[in-house]
Image (cartoon, grey):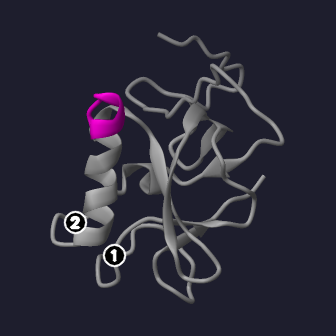
Amino acid sequence: MVEVANPGLILRPGMTASVSVITAEAKDVKRVAPLALRFKPDPQDKDLFHVWNREALADGSSPAERHRLWILDADGAVRCVPVTVGVSDGNNTEIVDGAVQEGERAIVGYLGQSRQSPSTDERSGFGFRFGR
């Protein structure tokens, strides 16, 4: 329940409102679209899927239990980077720890998949640039 002053009687019974409650804030941090954190290799993509499963065998955890980003390097190579995430507002998620740099491109999907974010890299169709 939220109480709001209404001195001009602009608000009337039955009206609805959207309220945002800020519970945490982070400034000047590395951030990425949550879509990049949800990317999982297609089982038919043998190269990436093998890397994903190999990581699980290395430490005994399920690949789904950890956050990771798939980074597309400038030379076209793909690398998987485990990351620790911080606060998120649904549009951006803070990257607290992980070997990623501002300006690198994180994979958010395969070419041909529907594009869900205007922040995808227009040149390749499947990147997201890290920003502050």
Does residue 40 appear anywhere in the picture? no
Residue that badge 1 annotates: 110
Observer-nearest of 39 and 47: 47
Amino acid type of the residue that numbered disc 2 sits on in the rendered structure: Asp
Q: Quadrant of residue 111?
A: bottom left
Please state the horizontal and vertical placement of residue 130, each as a whole percent of the image. Answer: 68, 59
* 106 w.r.t. 81: above or below: below
Q: Which region shows up in magenta?
A: 57-62
Element at badge 2? loop
Mark 1 nearby-residue class (10 Å; few <14, some 14–19, many ≥20): some
Does residue 10 appear anywhere in the picture? yes
Residue at x 49%, y 33% (from the top left corner) = 17
Proximity of marks 2 and 1: CB atoms separated by less than 8 Å = yes
Q: Quadrant of residue 113?
A: bottom left
Observer-nearest of 34 and 79: 79
Residue at x 64%, y 24% (from the top left corner) = 22
Element at badge 1? loop
Residue that badge 2 annotates: 42
* 22 w.r.t. 119: above or below: above
